[in-house]
Amino acid sequence: MEWNNSKLIEGDVADAVAGLKRDHGQIDVIGSGNLVQTLLRHDLVDRLNVWVYPVLLGSGKRLFADGTVPTALRLVESVTFPKGAVLLAYQRTGKPTYGSMA
């Protein structure tokens, strides 16, 4: 099946994505938590667009599962849509610091 503006990654994922970033600047990952985890591990993520939908299913894959590289994030954009979906856009800011939320 062909998808416009899509590329099948074969071989070393980190090398392939680094090359795509050099060639195209922006890459979007839709629906592959495993690929996002791989890109985070190889420092290939600049911005995370996290969509939150107003539905609780009670099961499913975790986007930030065990093995996630600890990373500090800074909220750069948030948009709420009429039916309740929310887009949260974060930039990576390096290693996390720990403290209170106060």
Image (cartoon, helix red, strand yellow):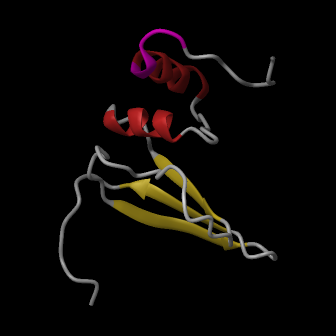
Q: Which residues are magenta?
A: 10-14
Position of residue 25 relative to residue 101, above or below, is: above
Q: Answer with left or right where residue 86 lies relative to residue 16.
A: right
**Image quadrant in which you'd find residue 14:** top left
Residue drawn at x 57%, y 67% as measured from the top left = 77
Q: Can you name the residue that lies furthest to the bottom here?
A: 102
Foreground residue among 25 and 100: 100
User: Where does residue 39 sit, x and y in percent of width and height?
Assistant: 42, 34
Position of residue 90 relative to residue 61, above or below, is: below
Q: Can you name the residue that lies furthest to the top here?
A: 11
User: Where does residue 24 sit, x and y in percent of width and height?
Assistant: 61, 26
Foreground residue among 34 and 7: 34
Q: Can you name the residue that lies furthest to the left here?
A: 98
- Check if residue 11 falls in the magenta segment: yes
Position of residue 68 relative to residue 4, above or below, is: below
Question: Considering the image in quadrants, where does the N terminus appear?
Answer: top right
Q: Answer with left or right where residue 79 lies relative to residue 20.
A: right
Residue drawn at x 30%, y 53% as measured from the top left = 71
- Check if residue 35 falls in the magenta segment: no
Residue drawn at x 51%, y 51% as measured from the top left = 48
User: Tag count in the figure?
Assistant: 0
Q: Answer with left or right where residue 57 lies relative to residue 64.
A: right
Q: Answer with left or right where residue 31 lies relative to residue 63.
A: right
Residue drawn at x 60%, y 70% as measured from the top left = 78
Secondary structure mostly taken by the magenta-highlighted segment of the chain: loop
User: Where does residue 4 sit, x and y in percent of width and height?
Assistant: 81, 24
